[in-house]
Each structure stands twice: as structure tokens, then as C-alpha cells.
Image (tube, rainbow, N blue to C red):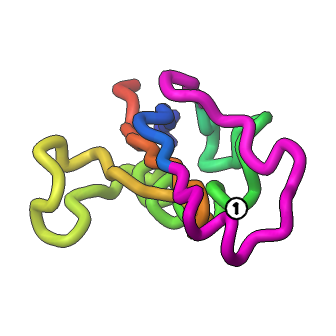
Amino acid sequence: MYDVKITVMKITQYYDLMSLYENPLPNACDMQVGMEFLSVGGQKPNGMCMSAWESMQQFVTTLANGGGNFYDGWMKNPYSAMISCNDGFRPVTFLIERLKK
């Protein structure tokens, strides 16, 4: 199996939607741009948000098992993926990359 590096690339916040629809949540997301996580054996890294993990788990598992080339050439690096978590108020974008052995 391969290790997979997960890097926080971008965080977006839709304050207009939050004010209209969201109940205020303290510490709703503690991710910061540049944070890195390491998935070993395709497992969820410590400190990774469960919602984010659920959005990327299938991609991490595929990369950890040697797969890649998602959607027939979507990414310049076939052993990577750009995934956003499913939080509609503050989506976080992650770069997921298979590391060399």
C-alpha cells in the first residue's frame, strides 16, 4: 500500500448562506490552508474532519491501493485528486496525492 498526503489548499466561506440558513456552530471547521495530513494504509488521518474524510475516502483508498487516473485524465498527476468537503457553508478544498514508496 501507498501512503497518501492530504493538503488543505483553499477554504471558502459563504457568509450570505450562513446568515440565512445556518444555526451558529462554534468551531465548525478548524482547517487552515497549508495543513497536511498523512493517510497510512488508507486510514483516516488523526485530526481529519469526518465530513471531509467522507468526501475523499474513496479517492484516498484507491490511491493507497495503487490506483489513480480518475475520470480518464482529470488531473495532470494521475496519482492525485482535488476534492472538496461537502460543507455547503464553508467548503474546504484538498489536494490528495499518492506518495512514492
Q: Is residue 88 above or below residue 95?
A: below
Direction from residue 15 to residue 9 in the image, left or right: left
Residue 32 x, y percent position in the rendering: 60, 29
Residue 76: within the magenta?
no
> How many numbered marks are there?
1
Residue at image x 84%, y 68%?
23
Direction from residue 45 to residue 10 in the image, left or right: left
**Highlighted magenta segment, given as a residue range:** 13-37
Mark 1 residue type: Ser
Is disc 1 placed on a helix, strand or loop? Answer: helix
| Relative depth, front residue between 46 and 52 | 52
Dot 1 alpha-carbon crowd within 10 angstroms: few under 14, some 14 to 19, many 20 or more: few
Residue at image x 89%, y 47%?
26
Query: Which of the 4 image quadrants contains residue 79?
Result: top left
Residue 14: within the magenta?
yes
Residue 59 x, y percent position in the rendering: 45, 60
Residue 35 x, y percent position in the rendering: 57, 24
Residue at image x 39%, y 41%?
95
Residue 41 x, y percent position in the rendering: 63, 43
Residue at image x 79%, y 50%?
28
Q: Can see residue 57?
A: no
| Relative depth, front residue between 77 and 94 | 94
Main SS of the magenta segment?
Answer: loop
Q: Which residue is mark 1?
A: 51
Instruction: Single out the residue that lies furthest toward the right.
Output: 26
| Relative depth, front residue between 46 and 17 | 17
